[in-house]
Amino acid sequence: MFKDLYSPLHQLQHPTRTQIQVKRDDLIDPYVSGNKWRKLKYILETAKSLHKNHLVTFGGAYSNHLVATAAVCAKAGLKSTAFVRGESVHNEMLLLCRLFGMELIFTGRESYKNKALLFEQHFGALENTYFVDEGGASPEAVTGCAEIIAELPDDTEHLFCAAGTGTTAAGLLKGIQERKLKTLLHVIPVLKGGDFIADEILKHTGSTEQLVLHTEYHFGGYAKTNPALIEFIKRFIKEEGMLIDPVYTSKMFFALDDLLSKNYFAKNSKIIALHTGGLLGILGMKDKLL
């Protein structure tokens, strides 16, 4: 599955961004794009090695992870189920999940907090089911994301990524460490109070010496926006011909633009931004973008 991985490096074209190349993980697959395939790759291998044929996972009603898991399971001939946080709703994302064959179980926000208990109550007696945490967070996901580093030039000085839980960032830093590179990893937390991400990354890497957190670009918190960010998204897409999403990549590119305007980087620094996909998230904010 995805043996011929398509994730090229693209140079940004706007005069203010010509220092930046973008690692286009968003092009891997329309529905399993960006860091989603990186995270699920080894989860899928582990599940198969344990003779599990049913993946059970978790997410919100506009979760890219749910769509990716549903699509991966359909491609692999596996069954998929998701506990969806909140009341029963119908939207474009959940339609895709259902089309890929995923069963949806809508779950109250309080009971959703204990994912292990939910899994045990519904599927604990079934030997063929495999627990996949929200967003695919797992050691396997970290391993998959670490492989990105081998696909980048060794002389990359600055690597940028957006972060929710920090799993992708942990994998990137692990890959940098394993290859003994001098690259600095710049992480843009999309949640308010994102300093906790450093601790999450440390659990997987043992050191955060080459980590730089930029915590001031959350725009109010997870999936929060303001008019400045919405205007930036529209302008960026028009200037670069590249879609970005309101939840993750837009905040990363906004941060990069801001840092460039402040002469944060040395002249001719080699900068790469990881496009982590998630473009279906645009559907959840289409009214704001119209």
Image: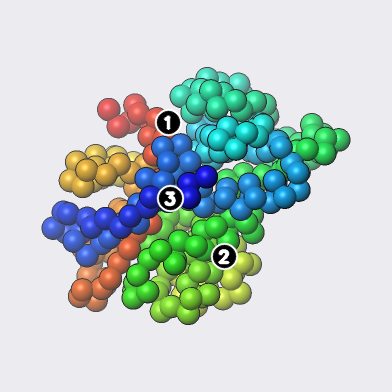
Q: Which residue is under mark 3?
A: 4
- Across and down, in percent, residue 126 comes to 83, 35
* Amino acid type for the residue under numbered disc 1: Gly
Depth-wise, is mark 1 or mark 3 nearer the camera? Answer: 3
Answer above or below: position of 175 versus 244. below
- Disc 1: which residue: 284
Question: Residue drawn 61% across and 74% down?
Answer: 206
Where does the image place residue 229, in percent across and percent down from the top left?
30, 44
Q: Which kind of residue does numbered mark 3 sit on?
A: Asp
Identify the residue position indicated by label 2 in the image: 201
Give how far across and how far down residue 255 sits, in percent: 32, 57
Which is more foreground, mark 3 or mark 2? 3
| Separation of marks 3 and 2 at Cα, in angstroms | 29 Å
Q: Residue drawn at (60%, 25%), measured in percent from left and top? A: 101
Query: First in sequence: mark 1 or mark 3?
Result: 3
Q: Quadrant of the C terminus?
A: top left
